[in-house]
Image: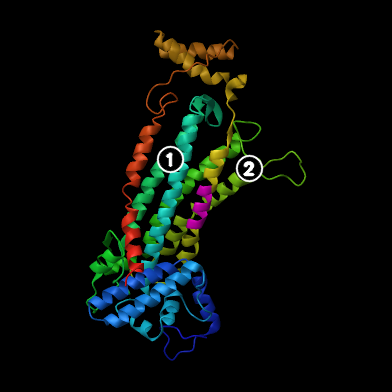
Amino acid sequence: MANKLWQKNITVDSEIERYTIGKDAEMDMYLAQFDVIGSIAHATMLETIGLLSTADRDTLLKGLREIYKKIQKGEFEIEPGVEDIHSEVELMLGEVGKKLHSGRSRNDQVLLDLKLFTRAKLQEVVEAVRSLFDTLQAQSEKYKNVLIPGYTHLQVAMPSSFGLWFGAYAESLLDDMQMLLAAYKVANRNPLGSAAGYGSSFPLNRTLTTELLGFESMCYNVVYAQMGRGKTERIVAQAVASVAGTLSKLAFDSCMFTSQNFGFMKLDAKYTTGSSIMPHKKNPDVFELTRAKCNKIQSIPNEIMMITNNLPSGYFRDLQIIKESYMPMFDEILDCLNMVKRMMAEITVNENVLGDSKYDCIFSVEEVNRLATEGMPFRDAYKKVGLDIEAGKFKANKEIHHTHEGSIGNLCNDKISALMDGVLNQFNFDKANNAEKGLLSLA
């Protein structure tokens, strides 16, 4: 069993070690490349303040870049008996690796890794959300003149359209993107240099590491930097959960609308599964699993809150457990986003839903409004149309003229897209991406 970085003359009980390490080695693989990037910035800074010689810095940078390449090729692993990613990287660097930890604690090291990981994953989520948004907007425009019934209380209510339905979920993603932007701003601050949460007597240059890593700013107060662990994950999880909420509702609608009782849309057979006993079945399993996965994601902010809400300031091992739901969350939401995009792009729309007379009553409000426009008081028109419906005398006029902003005849998709572009332009991913590329190419 390899020694721990913190181990002195105490033998570690193997069962206690298993319990305390838990899934850390598995979770740390998510952080591997970011641990290396953070260490490159830290080593670069240490040389500028005289804690590393230029020769030692160059040796460390060369070794760290080689480790990064191994990670990218899938050739990196945390060896049995090595406690975590930080220990593995230091051990791989050999004797000079012992100098790398000056002015740094594993507390601010993992904080930094999580910030860099989160920043990169949020970029992937943002790009996937935008891609689904574009698909929904395109479908909204394509089917903007195809009417369907709208519902309140799951009872047929008023005319709607596929243009409105697809476009509604696109605009929902716009608000979700605002949440992702706020989360990105919280994550995009540098905690490195806060050490164990109380700073260091070394003359660290935190401004330099902030610039090298492409952060917008640092977490200035070293106590708050440590307090931000758990809080950042909760805020980011809330933003991801907002996206999941949109997808879950869309999945529910789609399951309902593709059922035979509705028949509004039809899924390609490859997105369905059959029954072991009923030969006619084509079950919307992909949408159902999407709904379940997204509902699970929506529980993660609450899980993080329950782990952290009664902790005082300072570091506690409780925070380790957050990784187990937080980091896999990104893979899950990306999988859902990509699958929903595929289904939305390939779904077949029924262009004659309202040919069924059972939907004629949705045009009752249109008739009330027509009579009111001709001068009849609204309440009298409402009563007249209601009595005609009850007497079976109502004749639906299916010609509708909705012109106000956001209605069937004026979807405002161009304005919604412009708002989305405005939000996207605020992320400034290039700054972070270029900074990390620069670190990996340092001589």
Quadrant where the C terminus lies? Answer: bottom left
Please name the residue that numbered disc 2 is placed on.
284
Q: Is residue 335 magenta?
A: yes
Is 358 situated above or below 106? above
Q: Is residue 254 visible?
A: yes
Whole-percent x, y for residue 181 in the image: 35, 50
- Indicate the quadrant where residue 419 lies: top left
Going by the image, does 227 lie left or right of 290? left
Q: Is residue 28 visible?
A: no
* Residue under the point 33% across and 55% down: 430
- Stretch in magenta: 330-338
- Indicate the quadrant where residue 265 lies: top right
Badge 1 density bin: few <14, some 14–19, many ≥20, Cα 10 Å: some
Q: Between residues 111 and 234, which one lies in front from this camera angle?
A: 111
Is 174 situated above or below 220? above
Whole-percent x, y for residue 294 in the image: 52, 50
Mark closest to the chain's N terminus, 1 or 2: 1
Q: CA distance from mark 1 to mark 2?
A: 23 Å
Going by the image, does 293 lie left or right of 176? right
* Residue under the point 39% across and 21% down: 403
Residue farthest to the bottom, as pictured: 9
Whole-percent x, y for residue 413 in the image: 40, 32
Q: Which mark is residue 172?
A: 1
Q: Main secondary structure of the magenta part?
A: helix
